[in-house]
Amino acid sequence: MESDIKVQCNEHGESNAAYVCQHLLDGIGIGFNVGIDPDHPDATCPDAWCDDCELRLNDAGEWTEELLKQADIQLVCVHCYSIIRAKNWNQNDAAFEKLLEESIEYLDGKQATITQEFRIDQHERWDWNQDTAQLVFSNDGKPALICDVVFVGSISTRSETWLWSWANDSNVEGVKKRMREVRAYGEEHRFNKLAGAYWPAQPVDGWQMTSIAARLLNAIGAYRTPSDSGFTYMVITRAGWAQ
C-alpha cells in the first residue's frame, strides 16, 4: 500500500512511497498484480508485482525468503507507480473503448433529459452536502432542486491526476460507497482506469469516468463542481423539486 515513507523522485519530486517488484520498473506488458491489505482495502497504491512473481507466489502459497529475493521489492513514488501500472497492466483496449463509447452516449441522453426537466444548468447556486449525499440547487436564497448524488472522483489541475472517490479519505462513506461497484467491475474486466485509484488525467478524463459510472450505476445525470485545485465529479441518482 502507499506508505507514509517519503521518497525523492528525480522526475516528480518528493512524495509518498509505493512498493513494486523489480521487474515492473522497466517492464512493458508483463502484468500488474496487487496485494490488497484487508486493513486498508481502499489503498491508493497497493503493493504490486508482475505475472511471473504471481505465478511463483501461487506455487509457493506465500511470500518466502527466496521469492522476496527474486522480487527484490523497490520503492517508487506514487506518480511513478501509476505510470508503471499503466505500462504493465494488460487489458482488452477494444472492450474498454466500447464501454466508454456506450457510456458517453448513455450519459449524453440522460443529461439532455434532466437538463430539460430540471434546468440544472440555470440555477443561481449549488451546494453539496456529503453527510446527506445531496446536491442542492438554489435561487434567491431558497432551495429549488434537491438531488441525491454519488461522488465519482476528482481531477487535480495542479498535479493533473484523477482520484476515484473510494480512495479519497476526504469523502465520507455514504457519498462514495457505491463507487466500489465500479471498481469491482474494473477489476473483473481488467480495466486499468476503473481499477486503479490514481493516475495522470485531464478534465476530459473526469467526464469519461463519470460517464462510465453513470451507466454502471444507472444514474439519471451528472454534475461537476469546481474548486481552487480542480473539479469534483458526481452522478445524480434521484432529482426532485424542493417542497
Image: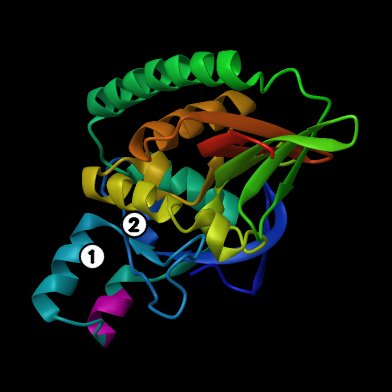
Q: Would you name the residue on which mark 2 appears?
A: 23
Main SS of the magenta part reads: helix
Residue lying farthest to the left in this orientation: 59
- Residue at the spot 24% in from the left edge and 77% down from the top edge: 67
**Percent coordinates x, y for residue 233 in the rendering:** 61, 37
Disc sitting over residue 156 in the figure: none
The residue lying furthest to the right in this view is 140
Image quadrant where one finds the C terminus = top right
Residue 241 location (% of width, % of height): 64, 33
Q: Residue at x 25, y 37 (%)?
A: 91
For the question of whether residue 122 can be seen, the reply is yes
Q: Is residue 186 above or below residue 239?
A: below
Q: Residue at x 24, y 85 (%)?
A: 64
Question: Which residue is under mark 1?
Answer: 53
Q: Nearer the viewer, residue 33 or 125?
A: 125
User: What is the secondary structure assignment of the residue under circle 2?
Assistant: helix
In terms of depth relative to the viewer, which is nearer, 119 or 55?
119
| Image quadrant where residue 22 sits | bottom left
Spot the residue most to the front: 243
Q: Amino acid at mark 1?
A: Cys
Asked which secondary structure carries label 1, the reply is helix
In space, the residues marked 2 and 1 are separated at their CA atoms by 9 Å
Q: Are marks 2 and 1 in contact (CB under 8 Å)?
A: yes
Estimate the x, y position of residue 221 in percent, counting from the top left.
51, 28
Which dot, 2 or 1, sits closer to the camera? Answer: 1
In the rendered image, residue 167, in percent from the top left (x then y), is placed at 53, 58
Tag 2: residue type? Answer: His
Magenta residues, start to end: 65-69
Figure check: 10 above or below 37: above
**Mark 2 surroundings: few (<14), some (14-19) or many (≥20) residues within 10 A:** many
Q: Is residue 17 left or right of residue 238?
A: right
